[in-house]
Image: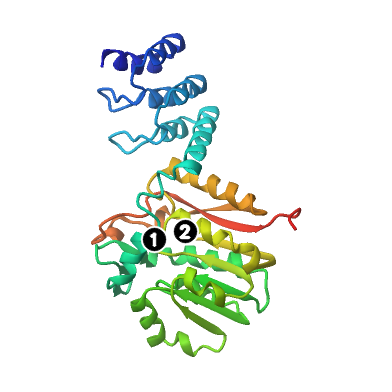
Amino acid sequence: MAESSELCEAAKNGDLAKLRALATAGADVSHFDHDGLTPLMHASKRGDAEAIRLLLHFGAPWNALSPAGLSAGDFAMESGHQDALETLIDAGIRAELVLGSVARRNPPGEPEEKYLEERVLFSEDRIMDSESKAVMMAWERPLMEAHARAICGGWDGGRFLNIGFGMGLVDSAIQRYSPSSHTIVEAHPDVYKRMIESGWGEKENVKILFGRWQDVLPQLESYDGIFFDTYGEYYEDQKEFHQFLPRLLNRGGIYSYFNGFCGSNAFFHVVYCQLVSLELGNLGYSTQYVPLPVKDCLPEEIWEGVRQKYWQLDTYYLPVCQASDDSD
């Protein structure tokens, strides 16, 4: 324990030689000191990229959180230490590619199956699941309108696909672009029933497919714009969907998705933005993130009655994904 405490002090003081000696001797690199900080957090606050690389080499957890809910990456971001930040982002991406430890807490599929089997509650400004978690909320309307503009704005009478109806915010926005074809996939029976009762099934240019996207995939065609926003799935599920983009998205088309990964932690969110960009890049797509300020959309009273705040950041980064110029 004493050696572990000394490790924190060495990181705090920038004593690289002592840090290396203690880590080599087996001191616990994941130790939290009396301030609730790990050696990696101390090194990140100082912007000591060399110490960060050393600690990561000895197994320091990149995603450990302080009592205030801050990671080493958050401390590097707050202090403006770019080299330290990039080192931690790289470590996070490499770890998530192997483990997926932040955005995936349970085996893929199980949470969604549970959600689809239970009732949801509708009100004017939200949809709630059986555990009082918000499925979708009205504060997202400006974001959904921006997503619709991103995937529809470059087309006159285009063909569009939305995976996940929710409150219908993005689909209502898509309709304003007079699409020639508008396909909606919705898996929850209560949401589907509400769609039908609201007249969505009577719109001439709308095709509704009831079921999980995995199950209705054979019925999907090709589209000029695609939006993806499911509830109860993890990144592994969305990554699986990405494998079908080359078949589903027309040349020059735009793909976007609700970018809610790690919406309560700024650093983890950055890691996932870069992770998705990397993985889509491997499929031949370039991704740009358009920053949208959302702080004014989220007064504290919005979350009254909601068990968990799924978004706590001041800026939302809207993804715009398109086939790279050099892709086939």
Q: Is residue 271 above or below residue 200?
A: above
Q: Position of residue 327 (x, y in %)?
A: 73, 55
Which numbered marker is on residue 237? 2
What secondary structure is found at the residue carrying circle 2?
A: helix
Amino acid type, mark 1 = Gly
Amino acid type, mark 2 = Asp
Q: What colouring method underlies this structural image?
A: rainbow
What secondary structure is found at the residue carrying circle 1?
A: loop
**Residue lying at 51% horizontally and 28% vertically, measured from the top left:** 84
Which numbered marker is on residue 224? none
Crowd class of label 2 (few under 14; some 14 to 19; many from 20; radius 10 Å): some
Residue picked out by circle 1: 109
Q: Position of residue 186 (x, y in %)?
A: 44, 74
Q: Toward which corner of the image does residue 244 lie, by quadrant?
A: bottom right
Q: Position of residue 98 (x, y in %)?
A: 48, 41
**Residue lying at 24% horizontally and 62% vertically, measured from the top left:** 131
In the picture, which quadrant includes the N terminus? Answer: top left
